[in-house]
Image (cartoon, helix red, strand yellow):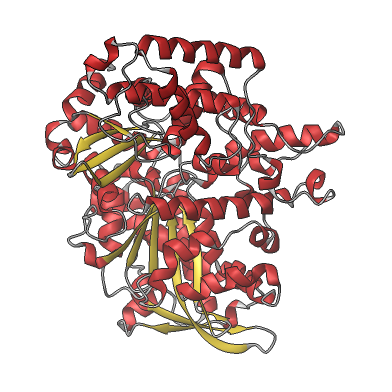
Amino acid sequence: MDNPFERRATEQVRNEEAFLALISPDPITTYLGKYGASGQLYDRLVIIVGTPGSGKTTMAKLFEYPMVSALLRHSKSPSHRALLTALAETGCIRDGTPAILAARLSLESDYREIWEFPYGEDFRDGLFKALLQARTVLGWFRHLQRTGVNTADVEVVTTGASHAATEAIGGVTGDSIVRRAQDVESSIYRIVGALLPPNADDLEKAATDAYRPFDVIDRFVVPFGSSQAKIEIRPLVAFDDAHALHPTQFRNLSRWLVRRELRVARWILTRLDVLPADEAIGVILAGNSGEVELPGITTAREITQITLQSTHDRRGQRSLFRRMAKDMANRYLSQMAEFSTRKLVSLDSLLPNEPEHITAAKISDLRSKVDSTQKRLRLTKERRARLLVDVEAYEGTGLGEDDRLSMLAILMHRYAKRIPQTGLFSENADPDPSRPLAVDSSVFEASRLHLFHSYGRPYYFGIDDLCDASSENAEQFLRLAAILVEAIATRLIRGRSASLRSDEQDRLLRERAASFIKDWNFPQFDHVRTLVDLIAKQCLTVSLEPNAWIGAGANAYGVLQTEFERISAQEPDLGRTLKYAVAYNAITLVPQYECKNKIWCLLELGGIPKLHYGLTLKRGGFIEGTLSELASYNRNSA
């Protein structure tokens, strides 16, 4: 069985129509749509930062010219209407025609090798930029050819650069520009592919001559559609996987592309890995505010800086991701014959959200513990009865006997904390608590967590839990969903019900989370694992307090914002560990979090650690701590 959830399906398909069938418009609208009207996606450098699997590459591929052309060919299809609207909002499509000629260039191969050449830095940088520009030009024309446009029919509108600069790129006709780009690329590739780099004096003329098409090209004029009407489009290059570059290469690339006189639209897609720890944390703290300094860039106003999985609007972000993930899952299911032939194309309906209650024997044990708690805390029968009435009045979802008993136990402990201690030594005393006891969702959620850890009652199930455990990361969602989809497909093959019971969902998700953590193999993963383990165990201890004073539970470590902002100066080693923890979804930084009349920076555990350690997926609960405490554990893990 081919399970598209197990792989990056959008990177495997070569057919434009198949690719478009898998794409949800929500990320485009959310992250890029607001910049479309102002033109900030195309008139300056755009740097898009995201964790692995956050959708950077998929987003860039969607903007490529063949994808946009295919989308316009199917513009009357209802399934593509939302995607068309999303691209129109970004300015990629205007009046039913493409406005952007985009090509994506992955920087994972060849380019880092140029930095290892035994030449001076300026010379290496010149080769690097020439190769980038040559391959970008070839990418633009290759995309045009895929849509049926002949190279000879392409005209170039220049920026008004000097005659010499125009001649250096091959002139203004498509054929001559392509030939010149091919010569440059071939010459530099022969250097990169050589066993030993030649002496600088022996390099081919095509590799060292002036070649700056980004300084010359302003627009392309190309025929479009069945009428072959001439349209003017702006070229865009998306430099993907920029984290593969040497840090100095990345800095030089940023400085070069930030120049205002460049007419070519340019994007850099990268992860936090490429940035020094202080700059990476600065990007996270700034979010999408545009107030962050990036390497080699003098002011943030010179760029459009977009951080995927923003931490500044977490409620809206979670709601958005749920919608996007459900749409994506349904699109993937429709590609699987086992599901599509049975009209099962909604993952939501296959993952029941109904809880499974514990067995009668376990309920009996729980009831005995509640009786013992009542006796130990010296609560009267009347007080217990009143607390039970409050529990039964709670309008939760399908409260079972185990829910009621677990919630009652929590209320008993809370009651005992809110009465004078003298009242505990009299059998008949039944004082009212100093503050009223509220039976709300926090009590219900705490009771669920207690039942999970004490009696193994399923805790993680339903499509919303699957989405929330994914840390707003598309790839992580697909990898978690894959094991559930595989189990459902097996049930279908065996002629059983497609619905996957909550205990099976819980078991499979936790097993996959444990496997993910075991397979961590990124820089400083051992330090990250120690840090995650420290935070998770402290959160679990607090979450399982009998009176559940922290409500639904804790899953984050809070440091005062003013203290955290000194991390680079005071605890640089911890800063480096956090950089990788955030870059690989182990921890999410939540700055400017207001609680108890103080401003905190939360180190919230990612969805995978939450599953592994059995912590709540609800947000907001955190334990208070200091940087020095975290730093000491980080040093001890070295």
Q: Nearer the viewer, residue 353 or 359?
A: 359
Counting from the top left corner in percent of width and height, residue 187 is at 45, 56
Where on the picture, by quarter, is residue 411? top left
Where on the picture, by quarter, is residue 505? top right
The quarter of the image holding the C terminus is top left
Is residue 526 visible in this depiction of the protein?
A: no
**Left or right: 334 with respect to 207?**
right
The quarter of the image holding the N terminus is top right
Counting from the top left corner in percent of width and height, residue 219 is at 44, 81
Q: Nearer the viewer, residue 536 or 354?
A: 354
**Left or right: 73 with respect to 625?**
right
Q: Nearer the viewer, residue 302 or 455?
A: 455
Counting from the top left corner in percent of width and height, residue 391 is at 49, 33
Residue lying farthest right?
495
Q: Is residue 620 above or below residue 125?
A: above
Q: Is residue 73 above or below residue 55?
A: below
Is residue 420 visible in this depiction of the protein?
A: yes
**Left or right: 400 with respect to 501?**
left
Residue ID at (33%, 77%)? 165
Counting from the top left corner in percent of width and height, residue 520 is at 46, 27
Q: Nearer the viewer, residue 325 or 416?
A: 416
Total marks in image: 0
Residue ID at (52%, 10%)? 368
Residue ID at (43%, 65%)? 32
Residue lying farthest front?
428
Residue ID at (67%, 52%)? 330
**Left or right: 217 with respect to 20?**
left
Q: Is residue 621 above or below residue 357?
A: below
Q: Is residue 10 above or below residue 397?
A: below
